[in-house]
Image (cartoon, grey):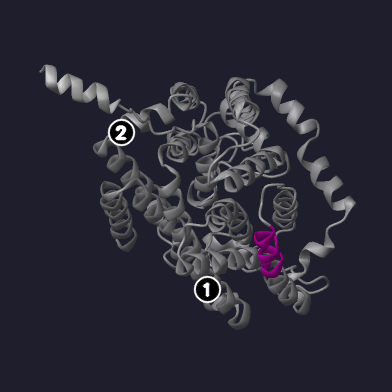
Amino acid sequence: MESILLCAAAFVAAYWFTRRSLVAGLEAVLTIGYFYGIIRANLPQTFSHFIFDAGVAGLYLGTALRGLTAAQRLRIRRLRPWIVCLVGWPILLFFIPAQDLLIQLVGLRGAVWFVPLLLYGALIDDDERSRLAIGLAALNIAVLLFALGEFFLGVQRFYPHNAATIIIYMQNDVVKGSFDTYRIPATFVAQAAYSGTMVLSIPLLVGAWVQPKHHRYHKTILSVGIIAAIAGVFLGASRSQALLLFAQAATIASFAQIRLKHLIAFAAIASVVGYWVYRQPRLQRFTQLDFSFVEERVHDSVNESFLDAVVNYPLGNGLGGGGTSVPYFLQDRLKNPLAIENEYGRLLLELGIPGLALWVAFILSTLVLAPSTRAGSWAVGWRLARATVALYFGTAFIGTGLLTAIPGTILLLFMTGWLTAPRLKPLRISVDPDYALAYRTTA
């Protein structure tokens, strides 16, 4: 009963905030997503798995009833045909009963439910994006407090042992040679989700932070939010996410137009976190990364099983047949259960070759057709977002969950949609004063 009430509360809250503004609605859904993992773990009921989905439903309904301005319709013009295709193909597959109905519904949710989030990256303007970044910084700070509590008091104080937390308690290898020290999940469903969300938040935080128009109070929140994000990557102890963070840092350092004072400030922020990481062996799991690990991950993910899936399942294994976020209480309903540690392989097993081809075509068109640079106050954030989107989709073949992660998928799709939006300039009409005076005299 409690989980049903939470679903209703998430829906109403997201709807109410969205009616006020799209940014408020996005912040509400992100807040639900940030705390979804710890709520689900401590309330192990069936409907706890749908709290975030209820929030997204409220966002969609609120947006539909608000309507779009003419400028917003122009911003999403390039996205609309892609969304029709990316949503339409899974809906067609739903009518092919290759899996149990409940499994197909879960698979349909994974294939369709988050896709419209692409629109929101294109819908909001630069000022609204700054407001979103400040809210995101506040969320990063809040979850860091939980992470520090788990770091010093123990994960067990926050996450009980149950079916929803199996992955959390399996990841006890944060210190080499020790098996009783856990990675830190903060408030997320798993430790990798924490690290990944922090990395995905950085382009928006940095893009807002470098703008000169923010008040000192907002600058402080953004600065602490960036520190919280970097610290969260090491607390979550995901080696692949640490690599992506280092790639982001290299990208920032390569920006020729970024001011020297900003580079110095970024170096100072990195030094603060770096000193803590240096003093805490528990935060140094990324140092265990070597070439053999990368080779092993690539070999496990890109091997003959992917090619076998192409040959044996050209139309997929049915919606949900690739294991997309299937809850533990539905696992026994899976027919011919298959799993592949490759997001593109998962798309293949779920949507077949046509669905995989649609996603690959969309990703390539977005990255290739996006301009190489962007003018305006969000130039740095936009370029970092473009690099981050390319990094995540470029490494999606060595893991799964990229398009179904809560709430990381929101941020990834938001930035992807942002890349497709044209930058609209206000139209100014000037009138010759002499002509206007002559017209009034004649009239």
The answer to which quarter of the image holds residue 66 is top left
Could you say whether the residue bearing mark 1 is in a helix, strand or loop? helix
Q: Residue furthest bottom?
A: 153
- Which label number is shown at residue 203? none
- Residue at mark 1 to residue at mark 2: CA–CA distance: 38 Å
Q: Position of residue 249 (x, y in %)?
A: 72, 55
Residue at 49% across, 36% down = 107
- Which label number is shown at residue 146? 1
Check disc 2 and give the amino acid type. Leu
Q: What's the magenta region?
A: 260-269
- In terms of secondary structure, what is the magenta stretch mainly? helix
Q: Position of residue 165 (x, y in %)?
A: 56, 63
Q: Give above or below for 229 relative to 255.
A: below
Residue at 29% across, 55% down = 13
Q: Give above or below for 182 relative to 410.
A: below
- Which label number is shown at residue 68? 2
The answer to which quarter of the image holds residue 135 is bottom left
Looking at the image, can residue 171 be seen?
no
Check disc 1 and give the amino acid type. Phe
Image position of 376 (left or right of 438): right
Q: Give above or below for 37 relative to 84.
A: below
